[in-house]
Amino acid sequence: MSPPARTVPRARPRVRRARGGDLAAMLAIEVSSHGVPWNRQLFATELARAEGLMLVAVEGRSVVGYIACAGQADCWHILNVTVDPGCRARGIGAMLVDAAVDALDGRPYRRYTLEVRVSNEAAIRLYRGHGFTEAGVRPRYYSDNGEDALIMWREPEGQAA
């Protein structure tokens, strides 16, 4: 009788700054995740943005998620957080948000905003868990189906929205 099969735990993904060589993997995740995906040029523009940050989550040699943030007006705008469909519900999105806030907080802004589909309950829970609160709705924001976007803000601790 052979011994029972052992389950080898996955290595925890690591988060690092995105590089030009990551664009193809990010684009593949984007296309598999969104009805109106960002294109390669938009990814390249955000990657090169002087007042912005793009991070990737890497598992082994594979990019499994990314986050893009941009400084706009007086806050950081989280533009895109996407995790490979086969890697969701493992905390990778939370890792990316944590890493972005750690890298950006107070440099030069301490406020964050984002839009999220009103139907994306998992993402809304993630953002609430990271201190974001609902501040309004952008009607028919998403061009693929006219869905509304929930506007969320995260204010510095001790300050009300």
Image (spheres, rainbow, N blue to C red):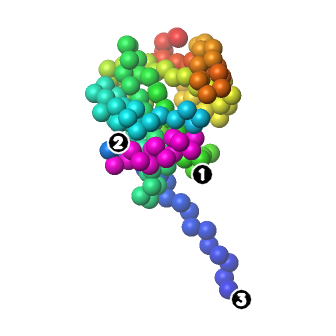
Name the side, left or right, on which 4 lies relative to 81. Answer: right
Q: Can you tell which mark lies on residue 17? A: 2
Residue 92 x, y percent position in the rendering: 53, 44
Residue receiving disc 1: 86
Q: Residue at x 55, y 22 (%)?
A: 115
Q: Residues within 10 Å of mark 2 (few under 14, many from 20)?
A: some
The amino acid type of the residue labelled 1 equals Gly
Residue farthest left in this picture: 50
Residue 35 x, y percent position in the rendering: 59, 35
Q: Residue at x 52, y 18 (%)?
A: 153
The amino acid type of the residue labelled 2 equals Arg
Residue receiving disc 3: 1
Going from the N terminus, do you reach mark 2 or mark 1 first?
A: 2
Residue farthest right in this picture: 1
Going from the N terminus, do you reach mark 1 or mark 3 first?
A: 3
Tell me, yes or no, if residue 34 can be seen here.
Answer: yes
